[in-house]
Image (spheres, helix red, strand yellow):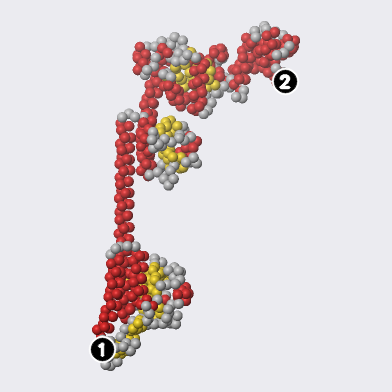
Amino acid sequence: MTVTLRRRYSAVEVYITHTSRRFGGAFSHPMLRRDGTVVSYPGGEAKSCGEAESCSLVRRQRELASLYATAKSLTALGELDEVLQSIVHHAHDLISADFTYLSLVGADGRLSARASEGTISSSFLAACIPAGVGLGGKVLASRSPHWVRNYAATTLIVRDPDFDRLVATEELVALLGVPLVIRGEAVGALFAGDRSERSFQADEIALLSAFADHAAVALDNARLYEASRTALQELKSAYRKIEDHMAVMQRAQAIHEALTGVVLGGGTPGDVAQLLADQLGGGVTLLDRTGTALVHRESASSPCRTPAEADLADAVKKARRSGRCTTSVGTVGVARSVASIQAGDNYLGALAWSREAVADHGTPDDTDLRTLERATHILGLLILKERAVAEAGERLSGELLTELMVGSPGISPAQRARTRARNIDTDRLDLVLVADSPTLSSTDLSHHLHDIARDRSGLAGEHLGKATMILHSIDDDRTVEEVHQRLRRTLGDPVLVIGERVVNHDWSRAFSLASRCGAVMRAIGHTDLGATTGRYALYAMIFDTERARELDRFISDSIGPLLDHDQRRGTDLVDTLSAYYAHRANVTATARALYVHVNTLLKRLDRVSNVLGPDWRHENELELQLGLRLHQLRTIATAPS
C-alpha cells in the first residue's frame, strides 16, 4: 500500500493505491480533494464521495474487527505465545505487509523473536540480537515508532552482522517498528516489513501501534497471571510444608511423651529401644561403653537387619567426636544414624538407628535425628539409674559376702533373712571362687563377678583385697571353667579363677584355701586358667604362698641336678622319673607308658643314680616327688597354648 500526501495552498490531495496480493491483485481507492470531491479513479472513472467513504468504512470495519478479535483473545488468559501469534497474524492481514514479527527483550537483555507471519527462514525465530542495535534498538531506546524505506541502505541505525544475514535471507527492504510499552518500560517491539522499498503512513503506524498495545496488554496479563499462579503454587507448597512440619512436630511430641512415660513407669532401656523402633521404623541398637550390643529391637512393620558391631564402630567414633547424631549409608543399602550417650564427660554408650536406605530419601528428617538424640538423654538417665541400683545391689552383695565370710562357719538368722530378701538361698552357696587378673584391679574385677552372681543367684564382692564370689554348683570343675570363659570374653585379657567347695557353711576356710592355691598358680606361672584347688591344695599347705621364691628354691634343691643333666646331655631323665613315680615305681608299667624296653628304662634309672646318688630311692623321696610334680605344673603353665 502506498500513501502519498501532496500539500497545496488550497487543498490536500490523497492518492491511495493497494498493491497487496492478499486482496486479489491491485486495486485503487479514489483520489479525493480536501473538500471531499472525487478527482478520478485510476481507471479514469469518477465516482461520488459517498462511494469512497463506503470503501474506507469497509476497511476500517475490518481493522476494528481484527482489533476486537485480538482484544477478545486477551480475555481468555490463554498461553502467551498463542496470543502473540494471533496479534502478529491479524497485523499481517490488515497492514498488507509482506511479513510481520514480534520480538521481546529477554532476561539477558537481548531482543529475540517470539512470533512471526510471512517469514521465509525457519531460523528467523531463533534470531537474538543485542537490544541496543538495529531498528529495534532505536524503537526501544525512544519508545516510539520508527521506519526505514531501505534497511540495507540506511545509515541511521547501528547494525548487527547476525541480523544483517537474516535480512538478506528474508530479502527485507522496508521495515516499520513500534514499541511494546508496559508501565513506562519498553519490553519489546512489533515489526512490519516489505520486500520492496516503500514508506509507512500514519494510519499504518497507528494500526500497528494498536496491535502492539494489545500485545503489551497480553504480555502484562500473562506475566501477572504467571506471577499469581507461581504465588499460588508457593502458597500451596508452603501450606504443605507447614502441614508436614506440624505432623512431624506432633509425632515428635508423641514420641517424647511416650519416652517420658517409659521413664516414669519404670521402663528399661529395652523398652525405649522398642518404642523408637516402632515409631521411627527399622531397627534400634543400644551399645555399651565397649561397643558391645546390649539391646536390639526392630519395628514389626519395617524391620531392618541387625548391623554388625564392627560396622558401627566408625560411626560411634564420629558421633563421640562431634557430640551430635551422625548418619551414613553402608554398602549394603542400610542407612545408620548413631548418637552417643553422655552424662557430662562420662561416656555411657551409643544408640544406633538402622533402616533401609531409600533412593532420594537417604537423609532422614532432622526431627527424627533430634528424636534419636533426645532418646539418648532418656537412656542416659535410665543407665545412670540402673547403675545406681546395681551399685547399691553390689554394695549390699559385698556386705553380705563379707558377713558370711567373717561369721563362718555357720549362719545367723539375720543373715539368712537378708539373703532370702535377695532371693538367695544360703544353704545352696557351696562354691567359693577367687579371681585374679594381671591387668585389672580386684575392685573392677569384682564388678564383673557381680554380673555373673546375679545370673547364678550368688553373692560377689571384694574380700580381703581379692575379687570373690560364692554360688551354687553341681559340677565344680565345669562351673569354674564357665566362669573363667565368661570373664575371659568380657575382659579380653588373661584371668585366673580358682574354686573351692564349701563344707558346713565354712566359706572362710574355702576362701583361704582358694586364695593360697591362686598364689601357688601364679608362682608357677599360671595367668589364664580356671581350675579347682584339687591339684594345688597340697602345695598351698606346704609352702608359704607369700614367698614365691621358696618354690623355685625347692625345685632347684630337689631335682635341679636332673634338670641340668637333661639340658647338658639332651636326655629325658626328669620325665622318666616322673613317669616312674606316677606308676608307683612299677618298672614294667613305666616302660610301657614311655614306649621303651625295660632294659632301656633300667639304664635311665642307673643314670639317675649317678646324678642323684645311689640312695635316691630311699632318702628324700617325698621331696623328690614334690619337686617333680611342681615342675610338671610349671611346665603346663609355661607351655604355649
Residue 510's place in the image compared with 388, above or below, is: above
The quarter of the picture where residue 63 lies is bottom left
- For mark 2, does the 10 Å Cα neighbourhood hold few (<14), some (14 to 19), or many (20 or more) residues? few
Residue 465's place in the image compared with 178, above or below, is: above
Residue 172's place in the image compared with 624, above or below, is: below
Residue type at numbered disc 2: Gly
Mark 1: secondary structure: loop
Q: Residue at x 40, y 33 (%)?
A: 298
Q: Residue at x 32, y 60 (%)?
A: 226
Q: Which residue is mark 2?
A: 570
Residue 131's place in the image compared with 440, above or below, is: below
Q: Earlier in the sequence, mark 2 or mark 1?
A: 1
Who is closer to the viewer here, 587 or 617? 587
Mark 2: secondary structure: loop
* CA separation in Å, label 2 and label 1: 153 Å
Q: Position of residue 617 (x, y in %)?
A: 68, 8
Q: Position of residue 356 (x, y in %)?
A: 44, 40
Q: Position of residue 397 (x, y in %)?
A: 40, 20
Q: Which residue is mark 1?
A: 37
On-image quarter of the C terminus: top right
